[in-house]
Structures are given as structure tokens and as C-alpha cells.
């Protein structure tokens, strides 16, 4: 793994961890304050965005490492 790729990988993982942590904090705030509308919707949207972003990033990274993206075989 090249130095630039490793830095990008670490940055993406840190961003995903921060979004997950923020989502959990918003869910806890929603439970503590008994206000479901603003906090729960924000946390669900944030966690959904983080999951979609992570899936797209990991699939693109896997395609680069495997070599062949047509049949998903390792070459």
C-alpha cells in the first residue's frame, strides 16, 4: 500500500468513526430529552450516509486491489 493510499484509508476510517460517534450521541440525546423529531432524524440520516459512503469506498478499494472487477476474482 502506497503512502498516499494509506493516508486516505486512515482519513476515511477516522471520518466514518466520527460520523458513527456523532450518530450515537444524537440517539442518546434523543432518548434523554424525549424529543424524537430533530435528533433521531439527524442521527438516522448521518448513520445512513456513513454506511453508504463506507460501502462505496470499500467497493472501489476492493476493485483496485483485486485487479479484475468483471467477475470479482482475485488475479
Image (tube, helix red, strand yellow):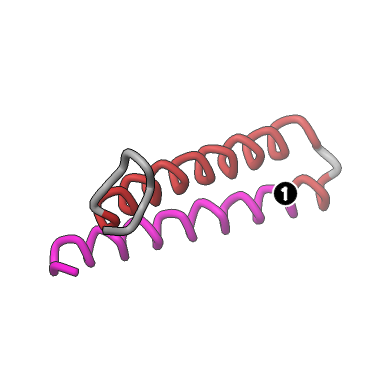
Residue positioned most to the top: 37
Q: Nearer the viewer, residue 2 or 12?
A: 2
17 part of magenta stretch? yes
Residue under the image location 59 percent in, 44 percent down: 47
**Seen from this angle, which residue lies furthest left?**
3
Residue 4 is a magenta residue: yes
Q: Quadrant of residue 41?
A: top right
The magenta segment: 1-29
Is 50 left or right of 7, judged from the image as shown? right
Around disc 1, counting alpha carbons within 10 Å, would you say few (fewer than 14), some (14 to 19), or many (20 or more)?
some
The N terminus sits in image quarter:
bottom left
What residue sits 38% from the left and 47% below the top?
72
Q: Is residue 29 above or below residue 35?
A: below
What quarter of the picture does the C terminus occupy? bottom left
Q: In percent of the image, x 66 and y 39: which residue is there?
A: 44
| Residue designated by label 1 | 27
Q: Give the vertical position of 43 relative to 75 (above or below).
A: above
Left or right side of 50 for 8:
left
Q: Nearer the viewer, residue 45 or 68?
A: 68
Q: Is residue 54 left or right of residue 45?
A: left
Camera-side residue of 49 and 5: 5
For the image, the number of numbered tags is 1
Amino acid at each position: 500500500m502506497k503512502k498516499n493510499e494509506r493516508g486516505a484509508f486512515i482519513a476515511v476510517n477516522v471520518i466514518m468513526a466520527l460520523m458513527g460517534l456523532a450518530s450515537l450521541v444524537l440517539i442518546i440525546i434523543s432518548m434523554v430529552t424525549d424529543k424524537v423529531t430533530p435528533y433521531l432524524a439527524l442521527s438516522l440520516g448521518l448513520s445512513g450516509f456513513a454506511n453508504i459512503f463506507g460501502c462505496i469506498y470499500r467497493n472501489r478499494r476492493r476493485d483496485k486491489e483485486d485487479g479484475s472487477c468483471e467477475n470479482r476474482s482475485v488475479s
